[in-house]
Amino acid sequence: MENTAERKKIVFSGVQPSGQITIGNYLGALRNWVPLQKEYNCIFCVVDLHSITVRQVPAELRRRTRELLAMYLACGLDDENNIFFVQSHVPAHAELAWVLNCYTMFGELSRMTQFKDKSAAHSDNVNAGLFTYPVLMAADILLYQTDLVPVGQDQKQHLEITRDIASRFNGIYGDVFRMPEPYIPQVGQKIASLTEPEKKMSKSDTSGGSVSMFDDRDTIIRKIKRAVTDSGSEVRYAEGKHGINNLMTIYSCFTGRNFAEIEKEFEGLGYGAFKEAVGLAVADAVGKIQEKYNAYLADKDFLDGLMKQGAERAALLANRTLSKVYKKVGFYRP
Ligand code: TYM
């Protein structure tokens, strides 16, 4: 007979504290974590180990780690029912990553598009951590026997390699890891840069192409007003019109209106009026989140307590998987 007392599914996701979190991170990831917290056991991590694959200023990294946790909460994640922690507080992540490194092929890692992009962008620092980055991400996910990983489109390839590593390991040692599934939103999975709409919006872009979740109202409105749009003037979603498609996507995510409704709303009004409306919609939504963010950030003791308690709960779960892995690969335990 089938086991009817079904185990509650596990969700795991994280963001790197490597720069100012953008509306791309919010729309592609954070926003979609919120509805999942009702149904699943959710674990949300600030992935600081990942962020040192690119040079960071230590004091800024430390500050951004706590800020990012405050932002998770401000975006609507419940501090009571989810586990929040910082990756470097749970040593099992680095430990499992080492083991999994020995079950991941050089060729597989060489094919990762993020590695290719990042090594081109940081050609003076193509370090081994940048290369094995997806293995650490696989460890994050597999440690918790995760079912669902809510991320933006750019992480899909990393989810695929995670599954490949897991099935290779399971193929040798039996069912050690649960097979995780990506959970990618239909709208908002790839928010583009405002200045180079063929590229994704990124935390590290400080040239006006990214809207940060920390930008003030005027900055947001100004950045969107200056967004690169395509030739023509009609607000219509169409193949190849990256600039306008991106703004329509952003507007759709923040207002809940679909593309047909947006086209109707701005019929005959042109890009200028549309950009103004997008700017206002983004500024309103981000402004509300910032209010909550400021309140959370002011309470250092609360945030520190939450991440400490989260790390303890996470370590308990993670060490279960790690022990199993150590046993399977043949590590001696007295
Ligand atoms: P990171 O910090 O680059 O981005 C965090 C999340 O935001 C999504 N995202 C976007 N979505 C839509 N449009 C964009 N322009 C955009 N930019 C970023 C990302 O897909 C991601 O979901 N490797 C991960 C962090 C990580 C992780 C994990 C995620 C480490 N371990 C385990 C899930 C599970 C990263 O660099 O995300």
Image: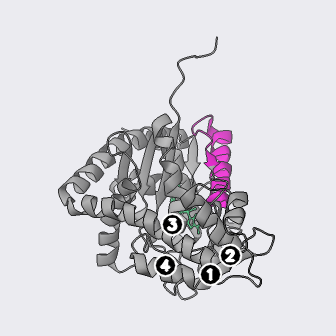
**Magenta-span inclusion, residue 157:** yes
Closest to the camera, between mark 3 and mark 1, is: 1
The part of the image, by quadrant, that contains residue 329 is top right
For label 2, the residue is 269
Q: Nearer the viewer, mark 4 or mark 2?
A: 2
Q: Amino acid at mark 2?
A: Leu
Point out the residue furthest to the right here.
Answer: 239
- Crowding near the residue tagged with mark 3, few <14, some 14–19, many ≥20 C-alpha atoms within 10 Å: many
* Residue 126 visible, this angle: no
* Cβ atoms under marks 1 and 2 closer than 8 Å: yes
Image location (x, y in percent) of residue 157? 67, 60
Q: In 3D space, how far apart are the residues under numbered discs 2 and 3 (Cα atoms)?
A: 17 Å
Which numbered mark, 1 or 2, is in the foreground of this view? 2
- Identify the disc placed on residue 272: 1
Q: Which mark is residue 122?
A: none
> Do callouts 4 and 2 mark residues in contact (Cβ within 8 Å)?
no
Q: Mark 2 or mark 3, which has the lower sequence index?
A: 2
Q: Quadrant of the N terminus?
A: top right
**Badge nearest the viewer, 4 or 1:** 1
Q: Residues within 10 Å of mark 4 (few under 14, many from 20)?
A: many
Q: Residue 202 location, x and y as percent?
A: 54, 75
Mark 4 residue type: Ile
Q: Quadrant of residue 176?
A: top right
- The magenta span reads 155-182
Where residue 59 appears, as percent x and y from the top left, is: 29, 77
Secondary-structure class at tag 3: helix
x, y percent for residue 80: 32, 41
Q: List the residue tagged with mark 3.
A: 281
Image check: 49 left or right of 196?
left
